[in-house]
Image (cartoon, rainbow, N blue to C red):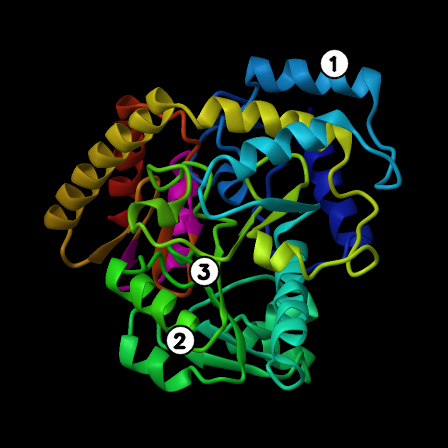
């Protein structure tokens, strides 16, 4: 595509699309492996992966094949009828963890958070009557932008312009057991925790904090909900991030990488909760459609193998060592390395946006998490060689 055509695309974006995003002045045209290419032929090593969506990178042959096969057969029928890809995927998800018995499908992360809020309040009403409706979330949390999900998102810039949002929410300090104990009460129906925070600066929940959350929820007859929309599906080195702690939730929300780039979300829940949800209590037009669930089945099968997860752990260990070396070499720029697996980041002494823009000029795509944290979310198929290339570009960007 000629440069003048790229400029025309950018101008049309500004003219016709609601400007809720700040984008660099380039147009991405295609992807291959772990690289993206713009319309002028420039290559970018992608350590964003569509915000943790493109776990298998770009052009995976199995994903491409199932998209073509299923699209030729059946894309959408609504939830008025059964379809085999949805039930196959549900079976795979339920058997991926001993915590869950049922699945509800929708189309995005914020939708499954909304569903989990509704299920928690429905469960509490049926088992404990009126008044047990409070939701607890953590500081630094991000659970979505719709009115329920944004209400349990702690950052004020996401909530304040749209007040009043859903009432009945309290926040506890992440990884602070005493703060969590103070926030809990018998009015609480659910506690939402990200085992690894994305927008909250790549903070990792300690095993002790998650275990305390489980105990407090049991004591107060509240449900424990893990939001693994960004940290799940192998990114942490285990299929689900909470597996490393041994703590089992009552519900879990998943979305981003599940269908390899197609819109999908899922709430996984135990049978006690499922028994309180009845026909008509919740619904969706597109959730669980044959195309998205067929693709998700292939993605889940590829990621949920010992060999694939071992690869993630091996490369993430190498990335961690490389980031630690970088931090040692550049103490005036890097304050702290954060995250786990291939959900990594580092806190800066300066502006994360400046470093992100400098990395872009070096041909590396990275994200930010707040004002001073660089976020690294590469496709899970990266190799040590890709890590070396990224570190070289980051070093140049930080100078």
User: Circle 1 sits in a helix, a strand or a loop, which is it?
Assistant: helix
Is residue 61 in the magenta section?
no
- x, y percent for residue 51: 51, 45
Q: Quick one: label 1, few (<14), some, or many (20+) residues within 10 Å?
A: some
- Residue at coordinates 49% horizontally, 42% vertically from top-left? 52
Sequence-earlier tag: 3 or 1: 1
Q: Is residue 42 visible?
A: no
Q: Which residue is mark 1?
A: 69
Is residue 348 placed above or below 130 in the rendered structure? above
Label 1 close to label 2 by CB (< 8 Å): no
Judging depth in this view, the residue of 79 and 362 nearest the camera is 79
Does 20 sit left or right of 247 as displayed? right
Magenta-highlighted residues: 346-367
Indicate which disc residue 13 carries.
none
Indicate which disc residue 199 carries.
3
- Residue at coordinates 74% horizontally, 14% vertically from top-left? 69
Is residue 354 in the magenta section?
yes
Distance from disc 3 to disc 1, alpha carbons, whole Å, reads 36 Å
Q: Which residue is mark 2?
A: 219
User: Circle 3 sits in a helix, a strand or a loop, which is it?
Assistant: loop
Sequence-earlier tag: 2 or 3: 3
Distance from disc 2 to disc 3, alpha carbons, whole Å, reads 30 Å
Label 3 close to label 1 by CB (< 8 Å): no
- x, y percent for residue 298: 58, 22
Does 347 sit left or right of 26 as displayed? left
Place residue 276 in its image quadrant.
bottom right
- x, y percent for residue 231: 43, 47
- Residue at coordinates 13% horizontally, 56% vertically from top-left? 331
Q: Is residue 286 visible?
A: yes
């Amino acid at each position: 595509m000629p440069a003048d055509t790229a400029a025309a695309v950018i101008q049309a974006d500004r003219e016709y699309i609601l400007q809720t995003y700040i984008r660099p002045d380039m147009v991405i045209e295609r992807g291959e492996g772990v690289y993206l290419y713009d319309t002028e032929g420039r290559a970018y090593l992608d350590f964003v992966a569509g915000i943790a969506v493109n776990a298998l990178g770009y052009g995976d042959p199995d994903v491409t094949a199932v998209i073509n096969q299923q699209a030729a057969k059946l894309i959408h029928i609504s939830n008025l009828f059964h379809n085999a890809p949805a039930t196959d995927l549900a079976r795979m998800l339920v058997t991926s963890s001993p915590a869950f018995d049922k699945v509800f499908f929708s189309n995005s992360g914020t939708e499954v958070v909304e569903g989990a809020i509704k299920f928690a309040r429905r469960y509490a009403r049926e088992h404990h009557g009126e008044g047990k409706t409070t939701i607890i979330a953590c500081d630094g949390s991000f659970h979505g932008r719709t009115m329920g999900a944004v209400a349990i998102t702690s950052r004020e810039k996401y909530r304040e312009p749209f007040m009043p949002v859903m009432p009945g929410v309290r926040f506890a300090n992440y990884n602070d057991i005493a703060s969590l104990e103070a926030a809990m009460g018998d009015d609480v129906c659910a506690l939402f925790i990200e085992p690894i925070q994305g927008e909250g600066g790549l903070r990792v929940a300690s095993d002790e904090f998650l275990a305390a959350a489980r105990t407090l929820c049991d004591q107060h007859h509240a449900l424990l909900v893990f939001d693994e929309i960004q940290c799940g599906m192998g990114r942490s080195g285990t299929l689900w991030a909470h597996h490393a702690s041994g703590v089992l939730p009552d519900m879990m929300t998943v979305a981003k990488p599940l269908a390899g780039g197609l819109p999908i979300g899922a709430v996984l829940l135990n049978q006690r909760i499922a028994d309180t949800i009845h026909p008509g209590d919740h619904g969706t037009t597109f959730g669980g459609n044959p195309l998205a669930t067929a693709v998700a089945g292939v993605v889940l099968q590829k990621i949920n193998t010992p060999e694939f997860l071992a690869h993630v752990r091996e490369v993430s260990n190498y990335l961690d060592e490389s980031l630690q070396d970088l931090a040692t070499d550049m103490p005036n720029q890097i304050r702290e390395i954060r995250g786990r697996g291939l959900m990594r980041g580092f806190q800066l002494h300066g502006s994360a946006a400046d470093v992100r823009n400098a990395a872009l000029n070096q041909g590396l795509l990275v994200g930010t998490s707040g004002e001073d944290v660089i976020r690294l979310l590469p496709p899970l198929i990266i190799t040590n060689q890709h890590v070396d290339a990224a570190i070289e570009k980051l070093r140049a960007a930080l100078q």
